[in-house]
Image: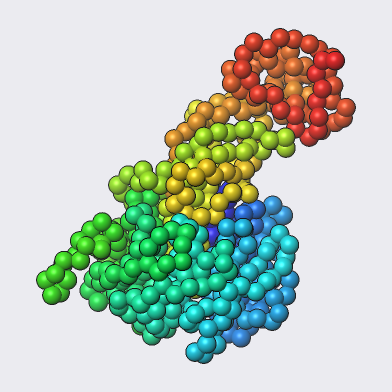
Amino acid sequence: MLLLSDATVMVQSGTSSNWFRLTPTNGSYIQGGWSNIASMSYERANYASVVLQDGRVFVAGGEQPTNGPQQIHAEVYDPRTNGWFVTADEGGVTFKDSESVILPDGTVLVHPLLPTNAPLTDFIFNATQNVWTIAGTNIGRQGEATWVKLPDDSILTIDKEASTSERYIPALNMWIPEGVVPTSLWEQAEIGAGFLLPDGRAVFLGGNGHTALYTPSSLGGTNAGNWARGPDIPNGLAASDAPAAMMVNGRILCLVGVPHQAGSLAPTLFYEYDYTGRTTNTDGTVNTNGAFQVVFSPGNTTNAYPSRAGNNYLLDLPDGTVLLGSREDPTGQFYVYRPGPSPLPSGKPTIDSVSWKANGSLHLSGTLFNGISQGTSYGDDAQQDSNYPLVRFTDGSGNVTYGTTYNWSSTGVQTGGRIVTTESTVPSTVFDGPGTYSLQVVANGISSDPVTFYGPVWVDFNFTGIFQFGTYSFPFMALSNGVPAVASGGTIAFKANVQPSISPETMTISKPMTLISVGGPATIGQ
């Protein structure tokens, strides 16, 4: 499941090439509607995936079908055209058990199939140019591993079937050693999810039930950080090839089951990991690195969920809930988990400015547009990062719509006080005409305070219709008609698709407003 930058959700049907789209209704995913979208060129399962800065989707390789053609091919989906295209050839490299992550420059780092007992060079895909290049070489084995993005845009991981760790530095295009993890986290070839925590540490969930936490020595540097052992997952359970999701309250929703070399076995239990909690170890000592608490399973009981943990997927939604989908549910039923308590203030975006662009889209700037963490984590079998801004509009009646964001200035996490920006389209209902809206930026379910946004009053000097309402379809013919209709601080948009767009009128405007021209230049006066 992937969250697109227009707040809709792409969901793959099983392991097929078929995809569906879940569109929220008035901001509600529970009340949302399903529709078909274009199918991939290849069937694939357990593959690398990233939502790109321009809103497209990149996928590469796949563990199934075994030795299938999808393992040497990558594809890009464009929601604007509802079409897929196969990318340029990367040289016949096989992508299987592959991690991927978007880098600061918008390119994608992808890990290919790892030969037995050998580190391997990663690859970088530039979607704008449709070009592959060679990246840094891993220090240890990384097939089946989990990547965690840190606030300095470096990527932290634990080497396969080992207790060594390493970190990728994008500016250097190289992996550096990060020391020995105090306890093994692997169940033979499997490990669990990993997350950047609100306090700046990172946590990895073990395929064998152990956990470990990492503290950076300094952000932006190459010095190794420090590792500490975390609390064990209760009752001998483990997150072996299993999903987890960072929630708006900073806790992590985890699916755990019986540890097994091929992934946690059914039945599955749901836990929340609280990084601020304390746990008493079996020897009576106290572990201050967090605690696990069992929570309700789907159906709102503590009964175990009958499916295997690894056949479920989680996704953070913009309304602050977490979506659960299962490959083992024959009914195709999805569930939504509602966390509590309130969202973390440290993850709250702030909007500094909203301005119109000549093409009728918006430019927004502010802080914390990218969220606390990547959102959800699974490991090599699914990357569903959603650390990018969404833009939500709410009218006076409470109706919710979303724009489509693109060209995010940052692909990072925990960006602090640094000013970041995004572009956003304006939903058709807002774009069409006058109205007052509440506008918010949302990052992994945490919303900014609302700012007032005015739908434009439209003026078209070439309009010849009878009715003039100031809407896109029925604009005013003259600026003198639009000025009284626009709210103080609002916007008049000149519809200048037909050229020349000229009016000889002159006037004095005595209230603040923004004038923009969409589709071409507009000339008023002399």
- Residue at position x 75%, y 10% in the image: 507
Farthest residue, direction bottom: 116
Quadrant of the snapshot with the C terminus: top right
161 relative to 126 in the view: left or right: left
- Residue 153 visible in the current orientation: yes
Q: Quadrant of residue 510?
A: top right
- Report the coloring of the rendering: rainbow
- Residue at position x 63%, y 37% in the image: 362
Q: Compare residues 59 and 411 and report the one nearer the observer.
A: 411
Q: Quadrant of residue 2?
A: bottom right
- Residue at position x 80%, y 26% in the image: 522
206 relative to 327 in the view: left or right: left
302 relative to 454 in the view: left or right: left
Q: Position of residue 425 (x, y in %)?
A: 64, 41
Q: Is residue 510 above or below residue 521?
A: above
Farthest residue, direction right: 500
Q: Position of residue 145 (x, y in %)?
A: 46, 75
- Residue at position x 36%, y 54% in the image: 198
- Residue 293 visible in the current orientation: no
